[in-house]
Image: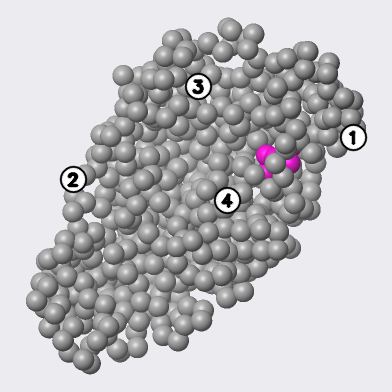
Protein backbone atom coordinates (compact mmCIF):
# COMPACT_ATOMS: atom_id res chain seq x y z
CA UNK A 1 0.00 0.00 0.00
CA UNK A 2 3.01 2.29 -0.51
CA UNK A 3 1.40 4.52 -3.09
CA UNK A 4 -1.15 5.88 -0.61
CA UNK A 5 1.61 7.53 1.45
CA UNK A 6 2.45 10.28 -0.98
CA UNK A 7 -0.86 10.78 -2.77
CA UNK A 8 -1.71 14.45 -2.65
CA UNK A 9 -5.38 15.04 -3.32
CA UNK A 10 -5.54 17.76 -5.94
CA UNK A 11 -9.29 17.93 -5.92
CA UNK A 12 -9.24 19.28 -2.35
CA UNK A 13 -8.62 22.77 -3.68
CA UNK A 14 -11.74 22.40 -5.83
CA UNK A 15 -13.72 21.51 -2.70
CA UNK A 16 -12.48 24.56 -0.83
CA UNK A 17 -13.23 26.89 -3.71
CA UNK A 18 -16.63 25.35 -4.34
CA UNK A 19 -17.59 25.54 -0.68
CA UNK A 20 -17.32 29.33 -0.80
CA UNK A 21 -19.05 29.90 -4.17
CA UNK A 22 -22.38 28.32 -4.99
CA UNK A 23 -22.30 29.79 -8.50
CA UNK A 24 -19.01 28.02 -9.14
CA UNK A 25 -20.63 24.66 -8.30
CA UNK A 26 -23.39 25.27 -10.82
CA UNK A 27 -20.83 25.73 -13.60
CA UNK A 28 -18.63 22.65 -12.98
CA UNK A 29 -19.28 19.78 -15.43
CA UNK A 30 -20.64 16.56 -13.90
CA UNK A 31 -17.45 14.72 -14.85
CA UNK A 32 -15.38 16.91 -12.52
CA UNK A 33 -14.68 15.83 -8.92
CA UNK A 34 -16.56 18.21 -6.61
CA UNK A 35 -18.07 18.17 -3.16
CA UNK A 36 -21.47 17.78 -4.79
CA UNK A 37 -20.64 14.49 -6.49
CA UNK A 38 -17.98 13.16 -4.13
CA UNK A 39 -18.30 11.51 -0.67
CA UNK A 40 -20.85 9.13 -2.17
CA UNK A 41 -19.15 5.81 -1.37
CA UNK A 42 -16.69 4.37 1.10
CA UNK A 43 -14.22 4.22 -1.80
CA UNK A 44 -14.43 8.02 -1.97
CA UNK A 45 -13.64 8.21 1.74
CA UNK A 46 -10.64 5.94 1.25
CA UNK A 47 -9.31 8.13 -1.56
CA UNK A 48 -9.74 11.31 0.47
CA UNK A 49 -8.23 9.84 3.65
CA UNK A 50 -5.10 8.64 1.83
CA UNK A 51 -3.65 12.11 2.30
CA UNK A 52 -3.72 11.68 6.10
CA UNK A 53 -0.91 9.12 5.87
CA UNK A 54 1.51 11.84 4.85
CA UNK A 55 1.31 13.20 8.41
CA UNK A 56 2.64 9.92 9.77
CA UNK A 57 5.56 9.66 7.36
CA UNK A 58 8.98 11.11 8.10
CA UNK A 59 11.30 12.13 5.28
CA UNK A 60 14.07 13.01 7.74
CA UNK A 61 15.00 11.73 11.18
CA UNK A 62 12.62 14.18 12.87
CA UNK A 63 10.10 15.31 10.28
CA UNK A 64 6.58 14.12 11.03
CA UNK A 65 3.51 15.93 12.32
CA UNK A 66 2.45 12.88 14.28
CA UNK A 67 5.72 11.54 15.64
CA UNK A 68 9.29 12.78 15.95
CA UNK A 69 12.33 10.59 15.38
CA UNK A 70 15.51 11.23 17.31
CA UNK A 71 15.82 12.60 20.86
CA UNK A 72 16.90 16.16 20.18
CA UNK A 73 16.19 18.04 22.39
CA UNK A 74 16.48 16.05 25.61
CA UNK A 75 18.93 14.82 28.22
CA UNK A 76 19.75 11.93 25.87
CA UNK A 77 21.54 14.33 23.54
CA UNK A 78 24.45 16.72 23.52
CA UNK A 79 23.86 18.90 20.53
CA UNK A 80 25.28 21.74 18.51
CA UNK A 81 21.77 22.29 17.17
CA UNK A 82 19.83 24.95 19.03
CA UNK A 83 17.01 25.29 16.51
CA UNK A 84 14.43 23.27 18.50
CA UNK A 85 11.81 25.62 19.89
CA UNK A 86 12.58 24.86 23.52
CA UNK A 87 15.97 26.59 23.24
CA UNK A 88 14.33 29.79 22.02
CA UNK A 89 12.10 29.69 25.10
CA UNK A 90 14.93 29.02 27.52
CA UNK A 91 17.18 31.72 26.09
CA UNK A 92 14.48 34.37 26.44
CA UNK A 93 14.08 34.76 22.69
CA UNK A 94 10.39 33.82 22.54
CA UNK A 95 7.45 36.12 23.16
CA UNK A 96 3.85 36.43 22.06
CA UNK A 97 4.99 39.06 19.60
CA UNK A 98 7.39 36.80 17.69
CA UNK A 99 5.63 33.45 18.22
CA UNK A 100 4.40 31.73 15.08
CA UNK A 101 0.69 31.68 14.36
CA UNK A 102 -0.98 28.38 15.03
CA UNK A 103 -1.94 26.25 12.06
CA UNK A 104 -5.37 24.61 11.81
CA UNK A 105 -5.12 23.43 8.21
CA UNK A 106 -4.58 19.75 9.02
CA UNK A 107 -7.49 19.62 11.46
CA UNK A 108 -9.69 21.46 8.97
CA UNK A 109 -8.78 18.91 6.30
CA UNK A 110 -9.89 16.08 8.57
CA UNK A 111 -13.04 17.88 9.71
CA UNK A 112 -13.96 18.49 6.07
CA UNK A 113 -14.23 14.72 5.59
CA UNK A 114 -15.96 13.98 8.90
CA UNK A 115 -18.68 16.55 8.21
CA UNK A 116 -19.54 14.91 4.86
CA UNK A 117 -18.74 11.24 5.41
CA UNK A 118 -22.22 10.22 6.53
CA UNK A 119 -23.47 11.04 3.05
CA UNK A 120 -21.53 8.04 1.74
CA UNK A 121 -22.72 4.46 1.50
CA UNK A 122 -20.81 1.21 1.80
CA UNK A 123 -19.79 -1.33 4.40
CA UNK A 124 -16.66 0.60 5.46
CA UNK A 125 -18.11 4.09 5.96
CA UNK A 126 -17.85 3.90 9.75
CA UNK A 127 -14.29 2.60 9.46
CA UNK A 128 -13.23 5.68 7.51
CA UNK A 129 -15.06 8.02 9.87
CA UNK A 130 -13.22 6.27 12.69
CA UNK A 131 -9.95 6.69 10.83
CA UNK A 132 -10.58 10.42 10.41
CA UNK A 133 -11.52 10.80 14.08
CA UNK A 134 -8.36 8.93 15.10
CA UNK A 135 -6.24 11.35 13.07
CA UNK A 136 -8.15 14.33 14.48
CA UNK A 137 -7.56 13.05 18.02
CA UNK A 138 -3.80 12.81 17.42
CA UNK A 139 -3.58 16.25 15.81
CA UNK A 140 -5.70 17.86 18.52
CA UNK A 141 -3.76 16.27 21.36
CA UNK A 142 -0.56 17.66 19.88
CA UNK A 143 -2.15 21.11 20.25
CA UNK A 144 -3.06 20.32 23.87
CA UNK A 145 0.58 19.44 24.53
CA UNK A 146 1.59 22.76 23.01
CA UNK A 147 -0.98 25.20 24.41
CA UNK A 148 -3.13 23.21 26.89
CA UNK A 149 -6.35 25.18 26.20
CA UNK A 150 -7.38 25.57 22.54
CA UNK A 151 -10.66 26.04 20.65
CA UNK A 152 -12.45 22.78 19.80
CA UNK A 153 -13.87 22.52 16.30
CA UNK A 154 -15.81 19.39 15.37
CA UNK A 155 -16.36 20.46 11.75
CA UNK A 156 -14.68 22.61 9.13
CA UNK A 157 -15.64 26.24 9.45
CA UNK A 158 -17.15 28.45 6.79
CA UNK A 159 -16.82 32.22 6.45
CA UNK A 160 -20.36 32.54 7.83
CA UNK A 161 -19.44 30.83 11.13
CA UNK A 162 -18.67 34.11 12.90
CA UNK A 163 -19.33 32.83 16.43
CA UNK A 164 -17.06 29.83 15.95
CA UNK A 165 -14.36 31.69 14.07
CA UNK A 166 -14.09 34.20 16.89
CA UNK A 167 -14.63 31.97 19.91
CA UNK A 168 -12.22 31.76 22.82
CA UNK A 169 -10.31 28.67 23.86
CA UNK A 170 -12.07 25.67 25.32
CA UNK A 171 -10.66 24.10 28.47
CA UNK A 172 -8.11 21.31 28.42
CA UNK A 173 -10.75 19.12 30.11
CA UNK A 174 -13.22 19.61 27.25
CA UNK A 175 -10.56 19.10 24.58
CA UNK A 176 -9.20 15.89 26.13
CA UNK A 177 -12.74 14.55 26.67
CA UNK A 178 -13.39 15.20 22.98
CA UNK A 179 -10.10 13.55 22.00
CA UNK A 180 -10.98 10.48 24.06
CA UNK A 181 -14.44 10.35 22.47
CA UNK A 182 -12.78 10.37 19.05
CA UNK A 183 -10.42 7.59 20.10
CA UNK A 184 -13.28 5.51 21.58
CA UNK A 185 -15.19 5.88 18.32
CA UNK A 186 -12.13 4.89 16.29
CA UNK A 187 -11.48 1.81 18.40
CA UNK A 188 -15.14 0.73 18.16
CA UNK A 189 -15.58 1.33 14.43
CA UNK A 190 -12.28 0.84 12.64
CA UNK A 191 -11.48 -2.46 10.95
CA UNK A 192 -8.67 -4.72 11.99
CA UNK A 193 -5.93 -5.04 9.39
CA UNK A 194 -3.02 -7.38 8.81
CA UNK A 195 -1.38 -4.65 6.71
CA UNK A 196 0.70 -2.80 9.29
CA UNK A 197 1.22 0.19 7.00
CA UNK A 198 -2.47 1.11 7.42
CA UNK A 199 -4.40 2.83 10.17
CA UNK A 200 -6.60 0.25 11.85
CA UNK A 201 -8.33 -0.71 15.09
CA UNK A 202 -4.97 -1.91 16.37
CA UNK A 203 -3.36 1.45 15.59
CA UNK A 204 -6.24 3.28 17.24
CA UNK A 205 -5.76 1.27 20.43
CA UNK A 206 -2.03 2.02 20.41
CA UNK A 207 -2.55 5.77 20.09
CA UNK A 208 -5.30 5.67 22.69
CA UNK A 209 -2.87 4.00 25.11
CA UNK A 210 -0.14 6.54 24.32
CA UNK A 211 -2.36 9.61 24.66
CA UNK A 212 -4.06 8.34 27.82
CA UNK A 213 -0.67 7.72 29.46
CA UNK A 214 0.57 11.17 28.49
CA UNK A 215 -2.53 12.90 29.84
CA UNK A 216 -2.41 10.89 33.07
CA UNK A 217 1.17 12.04 33.63
CA UNK A 218 0.35 15.67 32.90
CA UNK A 219 -2.51 15.64 35.38
CA UNK A 220 -0.46 13.87 38.05
CA UNK A 221 2.81 15.78 37.78
CA UNK A 222 1.68 19.27 36.72
CA UNK A 223 0.03 20.87 39.71
CA UNK A 224 -0.43 24.12 37.79
CA UNK A 225 -3.24 22.43 35.82
CA UNK A 226 -5.27 21.88 38.98
CA UNK A 227 -6.55 18.52 37.67
CA UNK A 228 -6.65 15.61 40.09
CA UNK A 229 -8.12 12.80 38.01
CA UNK A 230 -4.98 11.22 36.57
CA UNK A 231 -5.97 7.70 37.61
CA UNK A 232 -8.84 7.47 35.11
CA UNK A 233 -6.34 8.02 32.30
CA UNK A 234 -3.84 5.50 33.66
CA UNK A 235 -6.69 3.00 33.72
CA UNK A 236 -7.70 3.99 30.19
CA UNK A 237 -4.14 3.35 29.03
CA UNK A 238 -4.08 -0.05 30.76
CA UNK A 239 -7.39 -1.04 29.15
CA UNK A 240 -6.17 -0.14 25.65
CA UNK A 241 -2.92 -2.03 26.22
CA UNK A 242 -4.73 -5.10 27.51
CA UNK A 243 -6.89 -5.24 24.40
CA UNK A 244 -3.79 -5.18 22.20
CA UNK A 245 -1.92 -7.67 24.38
CA UNK A 246 -4.88 -10.06 24.41
CA UNK A 247 -5.33 -10.01 20.62
CA UNK A 248 -2.39 -12.35 20.21
CA UNK A 249 -1.40 -10.57 16.99
CA UNK A 250 1.80 -8.97 18.26
CA UNK A 251 5.02 -10.11 19.87
CA UNK A 252 8.55 -8.81 20.21
CA UNK A 253 10.86 -9.23 17.28
CA UNK A 254 13.69 -11.46 18.60
CA UNK A 255 16.32 -9.18 17.03
CA UNK A 256 16.04 -5.75 18.68
CA UNK A 257 18.48 -3.98 16.34
CA UNK A 258 16.78 -5.17 13.16
CA UNK A 259 13.72 -3.08 14.02
CA UNK A 260 15.80 -0.06 13.04
CA UNK A 261 18.40 -1.36 10.56
CA UNK A 262 16.40 -3.19 7.93
CA UNK A 263 15.12 -3.20 4.39
CA UNK A 264 11.60 -4.47 5.03
CA UNK A 265 9.51 -4.58 8.21
CA UNK A 266 6.69 -6.53 6.58
CA UNK A 267 5.94 -9.57 8.71
CA UNK A 268 7.80 -8.16 11.72
CA UNK A 269 5.54 -9.19 14.65
CA UNK A 270 6.44 -6.09 16.66
CA UNK A 271 5.15 -3.54 14.18
CA UNK A 272 1.73 -2.11 15.00
CA UNK A 273 2.39 0.44 12.27
CA UNK A 274 5.46 1.17 10.19
CA UNK A 275 6.63 3.39 7.36
CA UNK A 276 7.07 1.35 4.21
CA UNK A 277 9.85 3.04 2.26
CA UNK A 278 10.85 2.15 -1.27
CA UNK A 279 13.71 3.51 -3.33
CA UNK A 280 12.01 2.83 -6.66
CA UNK A 281 8.95 4.83 -5.61
CA UNK A 282 10.96 7.68 -4.12
CA UNK A 283 9.81 6.87 -0.57
CA UNK A 284 12.99 7.81 1.25
CA UNK A 285 14.31 9.53 4.36
CA UNK A 286 17.45 11.47 5.20
CA UNK A 287 19.92 10.18 7.77
CA UNK A 288 21.82 13.46 7.78
CA UNK A 289 20.06 15.03 10.78
CA UNK A 290 21.74 12.56 13.13
CA UNK A 291 25.17 13.95 12.39
CA UNK A 292 24.81 17.11 14.39
CA UNK A 293 23.99 15.25 17.63
CA UNK A 294 25.98 13.20 20.06
CA UNK A 295 24.43 11.05 22.76
CA UNK A 296 24.98 11.90 26.40
CA UNK A 297 26.86 10.24 29.22
CA UNK A 298 23.64 10.50 31.22
CA UNK A 299 21.96 8.17 28.72
CA UNK A 300 24.93 5.80 28.51
CA UNK A 301 25.12 5.44 32.30
CA UNK A 302 21.44 4.52 32.53
CA UNK A 303 22.12 1.14 30.89
CA UNK A 304 22.53 -1.57 33.51
CA UNK A 305 25.67 -3.56 34.23
CA UNK A 306 25.60 -7.38 34.37
CA UNK A 307 27.61 -9.24 36.99
CA UNK A 308 27.27 -12.91 38.00
CA UNK A 309 23.99 -13.23 36.14
CA UNK A 310 22.42 -10.24 37.89
CA UNK A 311 21.97 -6.60 37.02
CA UNK A 312 23.30 -3.62 38.91
CA UNK A 313 23.38 0.12 38.18
CA UNK A 314 26.43 1.03 36.13
CA UNK A 315 27.00 3.95 38.48
CA UNK A 316 27.60 1.50 41.34
CA UNK A 317 30.46 -0.23 39.50
CA UNK A 318 33.89 0.58 40.94
CA UNK A 319 35.71 3.10 38.78
CA UNK A 320 32.76 3.69 36.44
CA UNK A 321 33.41 7.44 36.46
CA UNK A 322 36.93 7.03 35.05
CA UNK A 323 36.25 4.21 32.63
CA UNK A 324 37.52 4.90 29.13
CA UNK A 325 35.38 4.33 26.08
CA UNK A 326 37.05 1.00 25.28
CA UNK A 327 35.90 -0.49 28.59
CA UNK A 328 32.45 0.88 29.32
CA UNK A 329 30.55 -1.28 26.79
CA UNK A 330 31.62 -4.52 28.47
CA UNK A 331 29.05 -6.47 30.52
CA UNK A 332 26.28 -4.00 29.74
CA UNK A 333 22.67 -4.26 28.62
CA UNK A 334 23.01 -5.36 24.96
CA UNK A 335 20.73 -2.52 23.89
CA UNK A 336 23.60 -0.14 24.63
CA UNK A 337 25.65 -1.50 21.71
CA UNK A 338 22.51 -1.57 19.56
CA UNK A 339 21.92 2.13 20.26
CA UNK A 340 25.31 3.82 20.60
CA UNK A 341 28.46 3.40 18.55
CA UNK A 342 30.97 1.10 20.23
CA UNK A 343 34.73 0.88 19.61
CA UNK A 344 35.78 -1.17 16.61
CA UNK A 345 32.66 -0.64 14.54
CA UNK A 346 33.56 -0.23 10.87
CA UNK A 347 31.05 1.47 8.62
CA UNK A 348 30.04 0.05 5.27
CA UNK A 349 32.53 0.62 2.48
CA UNK A 350 35.29 1.64 4.87
CA UNK A 351 38.42 -0.25 5.93
CA UNK A 352 39.14 1.34 9.28
CA UNK A 353 36.96 1.61 12.40
CA UNK A 354 34.74 4.62 12.77
CA UNK A 355 36.20 7.36 15.01
CA UNK A 356 33.55 9.44 16.81
CA UNK A 357 33.72 13.21 16.90
CA UNK A 358 34.44 14.97 20.16
CA UNK A 359 32.36 17.88 18.87
CA UNK A 360 29.43 15.53 19.49
CA UNK A 361 31.03 14.52 22.83
CA UNK A 362 32.16 11.09 21.65
CA UNK A 363 28.95 9.06 21.79
CA UNK A 364 27.67 8.60 18.26
CA UNK A 365 24.40 6.92 17.36
CA UNK A 366 24.19 3.41 15.97
CA UNK A 367 20.47 2.63 16.27
CA UNK A 368 19.49 4.20 12.95
CA UNK A 369 22.85 3.52 11.31
CA UNK A 370 22.00 2.44 7.76
CA UNK A 371 23.06 -0.94 6.50
CA UNK A 372 24.89 -1.26 3.21
CA UNK A 373 21.71 -2.38 1.48
CA UNK A 374 19.31 0.37 2.57
CA UNK A 375 21.21 3.62 2.32
CA UNK A 376 23.16 5.61 -0.23
CA UNK A 377 26.32 7.11 1.21
CA UNK A 378 26.99 8.81 4.55
CA UNK A 379 26.92 12.31 5.90
CA UNK A 380 24.47 15.19 5.74
CA UNK A 381 21.77 14.73 3.14
CA UNK A 382 22.31 11.05 2.47
CA UNK A 383 19.30 9.03 1.41
CA UNK A 384 17.93 5.90 3.08
CA UNK A 385 15.09 3.62 2.11
CA UNK A 386 14.86 1.08 4.92
CA UNK A 387 11.46 0.85 6.62
CA UNK A 388 10.91 2.66 9.91
CA UNK A 389 8.68 1.86 12.90
CA UNK A 390 5.85 4.24 13.74
CA UNK A 391 4.38 2.25 16.64
CA UNK A 392 6.14 -0.76 18.17
CA UNK A 393 4.55 -3.36 20.44
CA UNK A 394 7.40 -2.74 22.88
CA UNK A 395 5.93 0.70 23.58
CA UNK A 396 2.60 -0.89 24.54
CA UNK A 397 4.32 -3.13 27.09
CA UNK A 398 6.07 -0.10 28.56
CA UNK A 399 2.85 1.94 28.72
CA UNK A 400 1.13 -0.89 30.56
CA UNK A 401 3.99 -1.25 33.05
CA UNK A 402 4.25 2.48 33.68
CA UNK A 403 0.53 2.93 34.27
CA UNK A 404 0.45 -0.01 36.68
CA UNK A 405 3.45 1.30 38.62
CA UNK A 406 2.05 4.83 38.81
CA UNK A 407 -1.22 3.46 40.18
CA UNK A 408 0.75 1.36 42.66
CA UNK A 409 -0.86 -1.87 41.47
CA UNK A 410 2.02 -3.55 39.63
CA UNK A 411 2.53 -7.25 40.33
CA UNK A 412 5.30 -9.64 39.44
CA UNK A 413 2.93 -11.12 36.85
CA UNK A 414 2.58 -7.66 35.26
CA UNK A 415 6.36 -7.39 35.09
CA UNK A 416 6.74 -10.83 33.58
CA UNK A 417 4.42 -10.00 30.69
CA UNK A 418 5.98 -6.60 30.01
CA UNK A 419 9.42 -5.63 31.33
CA UNK A 420 10.77 -9.16 31.47
CA UNK A 421 9.68 -9.87 27.92
CA UNK A 422 11.75 -6.87 26.81
CA UNK A 423 14.70 -8.16 28.82
CA UNK A 424 14.30 -11.75 27.57
CA UNK A 425 14.46 -10.47 24.02
CA UNK A 426 18.00 -9.09 24.47
CA UNK A 427 19.26 -11.70 26.93
CA UNK A 428 19.13 -9.50 30.03
CA UNK A 429 18.56 -10.99 33.51
CA UNK A 430 14.92 -10.79 34.56
CA UNK A 431 13.73 -8.12 36.98
CA UNK A 432 12.08 -8.74 40.35
CA UNK A 433 9.39 -6.44 41.70
CA UNK A 434 10.47 -7.03 45.28
CA UNK A 435 14.02 -6.05 44.37
CA UNK A 436 12.83 -2.90 42.61
CA UNK A 437 10.77 -1.83 45.61
CA UNK A 438 13.37 -2.57 48.27
CA UNK A 439 16.62 -1.57 46.51
CA UNK A 440 16.10 1.84 44.97
CA UNK A 441 19.01 3.10 42.90
CA UNK A 442 19.88 6.50 44.45
CA UNK A 443 21.07 7.89 41.11
CA UNK A 444 17.79 7.12 39.36
CA UNK A 445 15.90 8.27 42.45
CA UNK A 446 17.66 11.63 42.28
CA UNK A 447 17.07 11.85 38.53
CA UNK A 448 13.32 11.40 38.92
CA UNK A 449 13.04 13.25 42.19
CA UNK A 450 9.31 14.03 41.96
CA UNK A 451 7.88 10.51 41.59
CA UNK A 452 4.60 10.06 43.45
CA UNK A 453 3.57 6.43 43.90
CA UNK A 454 3.51 3.85 46.66
CA UNK A 455 5.57 1.75 44.24
CA UNK A 456 8.26 4.38 43.74
CA UNK A 457 10.99 1.86 42.96
CA UNK A 458 8.87 0.32 40.23
CA UNK A 459 8.14 3.71 38.64
CA UNK A 460 11.84 4.57 38.67
CA UNK A 461 12.91 1.34 37.01
CA UNK A 462 10.12 1.41 34.43
CA UNK A 463 11.31 4.89 33.47
CA UNK A 464 14.84 3.54 33.12
CA UNK A 465 13.57 0.67 30.97
CA UNK A 466 11.52 3.03 28.81
CA UNK A 467 14.48 5.32 28.28
CA UNK A 468 16.71 2.43 27.23
CA UNK A 469 14.22 0.58 25.05
CA UNK A 470 12.97 3.67 23.20
CA UNK A 471 16.18 5.71 23.05
CA UNK A 472 16.58 7.72 19.83
CA UNK A 473 12.98 7.04 18.79
CA UNK A 474 11.57 10.46 19.61
CA UNK A 475 9.89 9.87 22.97
CA UNK A 476 12.28 11.48 25.43
CA UNK A 477 11.24 15.11 24.91
CA UNK A 478 7.57 14.40 25.63
CA UNK A 479 8.48 12.12 28.52
CA UNK A 480 10.46 14.83 30.30
CA UNK A 481 7.69 17.32 29.64
CA UNK A 482 4.88 15.11 30.97
CA UNK A 483 6.88 14.09 34.04
CA UNK A 484 7.49 17.78 34.84
CA UNK A 485 11.25 17.48 34.44
CA UNK A 486 11.80 20.41 32.11
CA UNK A 487 14.91 21.58 33.92
CA UNK A 488 16.92 18.88 32.14
CA UNK A 489 16.54 20.69 28.82
CA UNK A 490 18.78 23.47 30.13
CA UNK A 491 21.56 21.10 31.20
CA UNK A 492 24.82 20.91 29.25
CA UNK A 493 25.20 17.18 28.68
CA UNK A 494 28.70 15.75 28.57
CA UNK A 495 30.14 12.66 26.97
CA UNK A 496 33.03 10.20 27.10
CA UNK A 497 35.78 10.23 29.72
CA UNK A 498 39.19 11.47 28.60
CA UNK A 499 41.98 10.28 30.94
CA UNK A 500 44.69 12.70 29.79
CA UNK A 501 45.82 15.11 27.11
CA UNK A 502 47.77 13.78 24.14
CA UNK A 503 47.11 10.88 21.84
CA UNK A 504 44.10 8.61 22.44
CA UNK A 505 42.79 5.37 21.02
CA UNK A 506 38.98 5.45 20.60
CA UNK A 507 38.59 2.36 18.44
CA UNK A 508 40.19 -0.28 20.64
CA UNK A 509 42.92 -1.29 18.17
CA UNK A 510 45.81 0.16 20.15
CA UNK A 511 46.51 2.83 17.54
CA UNK A 512 45.91 6.51 18.39
CA UNK A 513 42.94 7.99 16.54
CA UNK A 514 42.86 11.51 17.94
CA UNK A 515 44.86 13.90 20.06
CA UNK A 516 43.69 16.50 22.55
CA UNK A 517 46.11 19.34 23.28
CA UNK A 518 46.02 22.56 25.26
CA UNK A 519 47.31 25.07 22.71
CA UNK A 520 47.79 25.69 19.01
CA UNK A 521 51.54 25.32 19.51
CA UNK A 522 50.97 21.81 20.81
CA UNK A 523 48.90 21.03 17.74
CA UNK A 524 51.62 22.31 15.44
CA UNK A 525 54.14 20.06 17.15
CA UNK A 526 51.95 17.07 16.41
CA UNK A 527 51.35 18.20 12.82
CA UNK A 528 55.11 18.46 12.31
CA UNK A 529 55.64 14.82 13.21
CA UNK A 530 55.36 12.85 9.96
CA UNK A 531 54.41 9.69 11.87
CA UNK A 532 51.33 11.48 13.16
CA UNK A 533 50.29 13.14 9.93
CA UNK A 534 46.50 13.37 9.60
CA UNK A 535 45.79 12.64 13.24
CA UNK A 536 42.61 14.53 14.20
CA UNK A 537 43.62 17.01 16.88
CA UNK A 538 41.42 19.02 19.23
CA UNK A 539 42.75 22.20 20.83
CA UNK A 540 41.21 23.17 24.16
CA UNK A 541 42.26 26.79 23.70
CA UNK A 542 39.99 27.00 20.65
CA UNK A 543 36.99 26.94 23.01
CA UNK A 544 35.02 24.31 21.09
CA UNK A 545 35.25 21.48 23.61
CA UNK A 546 36.36 21.31 27.21
CA UNK A 547 37.18 18.63 29.79
CA UNK A 548 35.48 18.61 33.18
CA UNK A 549 38.77 18.54 35.13
CA UNK A 550 40.67 20.86 32.83
CA UNK A 551 43.20 18.42 31.39
CA UNK A 552 41.10 15.27 31.88
CA UNK A 553 37.51 14.31 32.56
CA UNK A 554 34.27 14.25 30.63
CA UNK A 555 34.22 16.01 27.30
CA UNK A 556 31.52 18.61 26.67
CA UNK A 557 30.83 21.51 24.35
CA UNK A 558 32.42 24.72 25.59
CA UNK A 559 30.71 28.07 25.88
CA UNK A 560 27.23 26.72 26.53
CA UNK A 561 27.04 27.43 30.25
CA UNK A 562 24.36 29.83 31.36
CA UNK A 563 22.74 30.16 27.94
CA UNK A 564 19.52 28.40 28.88
CA UNK A 565 17.13 28.48 31.81
CA UNK A 566 13.87 26.53 31.96
CA UNK A 567 11.23 28.75 33.59
CA UNK A 568 8.57 26.89 35.56
CA UNK A 569 5.81 26.33 34.64
CA UNK A 570 5.87 28.75 31.69
CA UNK A 571 8.15 26.77 29.41
CA UNK A 572 5.92 23.70 29.43
CA UNK A 573 3.61 25.66 27.14
CA UNK A 574 3.78 27.95 24.12
CA UNK A 575 2.37 31.48 24.00
CA UNK A 576 -0.53 32.32 21.73
CA UNK A 577 0.79 34.47 18.91
CA UNK A 578 -0.16 38.13 19.27
CA UNK A 579 -1.12 37.98 15.58
CA UNK A 580 -3.77 35.37 16.39
CA UNK A 581 -5.07 37.45 19.30
CA UNK A 582 -5.25 40.52 17.06
CA UNK A 583 -7.29 38.56 14.53
CA UNK A 584 -9.49 37.08 17.27
CA UNK A 585 -9.60 39.34 20.34
CA UNK A 586 -11.63 36.70 22.20
CA UNK A 587 -8.56 34.51 22.53
CA UNK A 588 -6.92 34.60 25.95
CA UNK A 589 -3.15 34.58 26.23
CA UNK A 590 -1.73 31.51 27.96
CA UNK A 591 -1.69 32.60 31.60
CA UNK A 592 1.95 31.54 32.02
CA UNK A 593 2.99 33.90 29.23
CA UNK A 594 1.09 37.01 30.28
Between the residue at mark 3 and the residue at mark 4, the CA separation in whole angstroms equals: 26 Å
Residue on which the image places disc 2: 562
The answer to the question of whether label 3 and label 4 lie on touching residues, with beta carbons closer than 8 A, is no
Quarter of the figure with residue 412: bottom right
Query: What numbered label is drawn on residue 280?
Result: none
- Which badge, 2 or 3, comes first in the chain's sequence? 3
Task: Identify the residue shown where x is 32% and y is 63%.
Answer: 360
| Alpha carbon separation for disc pair 3 and 1 | 35 Å
Most distant residue in the bottom direction: 531
Which numbered dot is residue 123?
A: 1
Q: Which of marks 1 and 4 is nearer the N terminus?
A: 4
Mark positioned earlier in the residue sequence (1 or 2): 1
Residue 406 locus on image (x, y percent): 47, 41
Residue 558, x across and y down, in percent:
19, 58
Mark nearer the viewer, 2 or 4: 4
Q: Is residue 264 above or below residue 477?
A: below
Residue linked to disc 3: 150
Which range of residues does the magenta coloring cover? 49-53
Q: Is the magenta stretch mostly helix, strand or loop?
A: helix
Residue 410 in view of the camera: no
Q: How far apart are marks 1 and 4 (CA)?
A: 32 Å
Q: What is the distance, in whole Å, between disc 2 and disc 3 at their CAs?
A: 33 Å
* Cβ atoms at labels 2 and 4 below 8 Å apart: no
Find out whether the residues at labels 3 and 1 contact each other: C-beta distance under 8 Å: no
Q: Mark 4 points at which residue?
A: 58
- Of the image marks 3 and 4, the number of the one nearer the N terminus: 4
Amino acid sequence: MKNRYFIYITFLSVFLLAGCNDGFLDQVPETEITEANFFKTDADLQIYSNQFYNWFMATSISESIVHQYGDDPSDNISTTNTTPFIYKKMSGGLSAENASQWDWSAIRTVNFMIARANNATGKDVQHYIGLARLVRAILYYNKVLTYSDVPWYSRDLQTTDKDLLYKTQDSRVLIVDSVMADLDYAVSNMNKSSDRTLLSEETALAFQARIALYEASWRKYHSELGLNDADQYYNKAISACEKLMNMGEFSLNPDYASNFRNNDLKGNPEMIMYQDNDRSLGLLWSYGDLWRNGYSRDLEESYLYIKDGKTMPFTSVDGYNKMDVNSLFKNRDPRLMATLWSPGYTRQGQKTPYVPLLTTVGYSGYKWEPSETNCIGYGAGNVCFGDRPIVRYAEILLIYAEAKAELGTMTQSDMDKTINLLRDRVGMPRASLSDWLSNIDPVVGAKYYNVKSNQKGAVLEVRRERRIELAAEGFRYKDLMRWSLGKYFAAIEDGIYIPHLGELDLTGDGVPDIAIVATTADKEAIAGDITKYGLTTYVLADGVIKLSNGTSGYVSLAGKEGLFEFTLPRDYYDPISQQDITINPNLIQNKYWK
